[in-house]
Amino acid sequence: MPPSRLFHGTIASNLESIGKTGLLPLNRHHVHLSPDEATAQTVGKRRGIAVVLVVDSARMSRDGHKFFVSANDVWLVAAVPAKYLTLPI
C-alpha cells in the first residue's frame, strides 16, 4: 500500500504534456515517485527549476493501480493518469 500522497519532480515545460497524458515512464519501465516533497524537488532540479506534482496514490490504489517500492524508497507505478495529479497553477 502506498502512502496516500506521493510526489513527482519535473520542470514547468513538461506541465502541458503531463496535463494531457499524465505521467508516463518514457524510457523507463515505471514512473518514479517520491515519498516526500523535498526529494521530488531535488529530482526535478536535475533538469532546471523544479515543479512538484502531487499524486493521489490512495485513490489510484483503490482504483486498481499497482504500486511497488524499491530498496531506496522510490515508489514505482506503470503510469499516472492526469486525473490523479494536482498540477501547480
Image: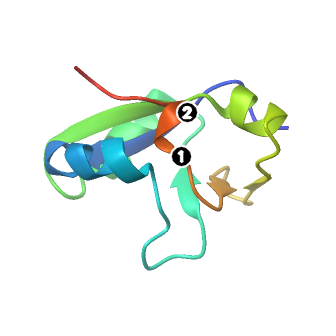
Three-letter amino acid code at disc 1? Answer: Pro
Q: Which mark is residue 61?
A: none
Residue at the image point whose x is 79% and y is 37% from the top: 63
Residue 53 higher or lower than 49, as above or below: above
Q: Secondary structure at mark 1?
A: loop
From the viewer's perspective, tell me whether residue 57 is left or right of residue 7: right
The answer to which of 36 and 16 lies nearer the viewer is 16
Residue 6, percent from left and from top: 58, 34
Q: Are marks 1 and 2 in contact (CB under 8 Å)?
A: yes
Q: Dot 1 surroundings within 10 Å: few (below 14), some, or many (20 or more)? A: some
Quadrant in which the N terminus appears: top right
- Horizontal relation, residue 44 to residue 33: left or right: left
Q: Is residue 42 visible?
A: no
Q: Is residue 36 visible?
A: yes
Numbered label attached to residue 81: 1
Q: Nearer the viewer, residue 78 or 36?
A: 78
| The C terminus, quarter of image | top left
Q: Tell me the tag on residue 84.
A: 2
